[in-house]
Amino acid sequence: MTGSSEQASANKCLLEVQGVSKRFGGLRALDGVNCRVSEGRVSAIIGPNGAGKTTLFNCLTGVDRPTGGSIRFLDREIAGMASHRIAAAGIARTWQTIRLFEHMTVLENVLVGCHCRGRCGMLGAALRLPRHYREERRMRRAAMDRLDSLGIVELARLPVGALPFLQQRRVELARALVSEPRLLLLDEPAAGLNARETIELGELILQIRDSGVTVVLVEHDMSLVMEISERVFVLDHGTPIAEGTPREIQNNPQVIAVYLGVEA
């Protein structure tokens, strides 16, 4: 499902990246990256290996501090902000390699994502104050509701390490979504999935978008990108080279040259 660039621009700008750069010693991983993510859309960031896609995600989520440039989320500067503060502001992410606690249950893994919305604090928990138990019950309800929305509530008490790969992806999504983000960043969500599972994942991402969460994904599976994205940004060696609708990107000579290794 794709939308026009006019439709995307009509939506409120949720995230604005201006001139972002990132260097690791003498290596320039990002160089002058600009993009605007519209609310209520699925956008994609693509590019060959080493293009800087995950580095950009790391800068957006506080894992890495940008060397230069501005990142504004809901009109608030977040460049260089700590990861937990960015999560509390409304940005959640998943990782290319699933990062779950395999010996914990599905529910326990999802509850980990609630921490940034907790208000009771360590003192309340240590003193076993009534508000601590009220908050704990609220978080469990939120986690179970999120598992239900993703179709895996019946797995809540199973150890997550015993689940098939796609179900683990769903658990990871539930853990990210239970933090109530406005923006969800997915780093290669289709990695390790077969064709049927990738189709299911695409339907799930559209379902998440329809629930009111804006989605940006980094992905190598072009069939998934072109099917569900409404805006595509292309990086090459840390530099933005194209932006447009899926159809525009498919027909862009510079993008074709980058992927085929020939001169435009």
Image: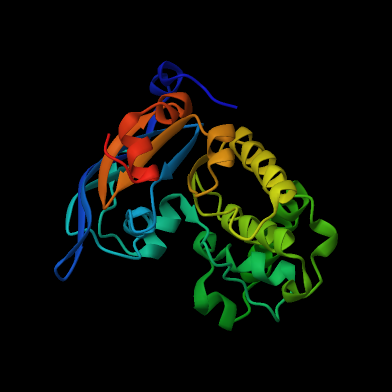
Q: Is residue 15 visible?
A: no
The residue depicted at 26 percent of the width and 52 percent of the height is 238
Pinpoint residue 129: horizontal percent, then vertical percent. Answer: 62, 74
Farthest residue to the right: give it. 154
The quadrant holding residue 49 is bottom left
Pinpoint residue 58: horizontal percent, then vertical percent. Answer: 36, 60
Q: Nearer the viewer, residue 228 or 63?
A: 228
Q: Nearer the viewer, residue 263 or 157?
A: 263
Tell me: 89 left or right of 72: right
The residue depicted at 58 percent of the width and 34 percent of the height is 228
Tell me: 198 left or right of 10: right
Farthest residue to the front: give it. 262
Q: Nearer the viewer, residue 224 or 146?
A: 224
Pinpoint residue 141: horizontal percent, then vertical percent. Answer: 73, 57
The quadrant holding residue 176 is bottom right
The residue depicted at 33 percent of the width and 43 percent of the height is 258
Tell me: 155 left or right of 190: right
Tell me: 24 left or right of 93: left
Q: Tell how many labels.
A: 0
Quarter of the picture holding the N terminus:
top right
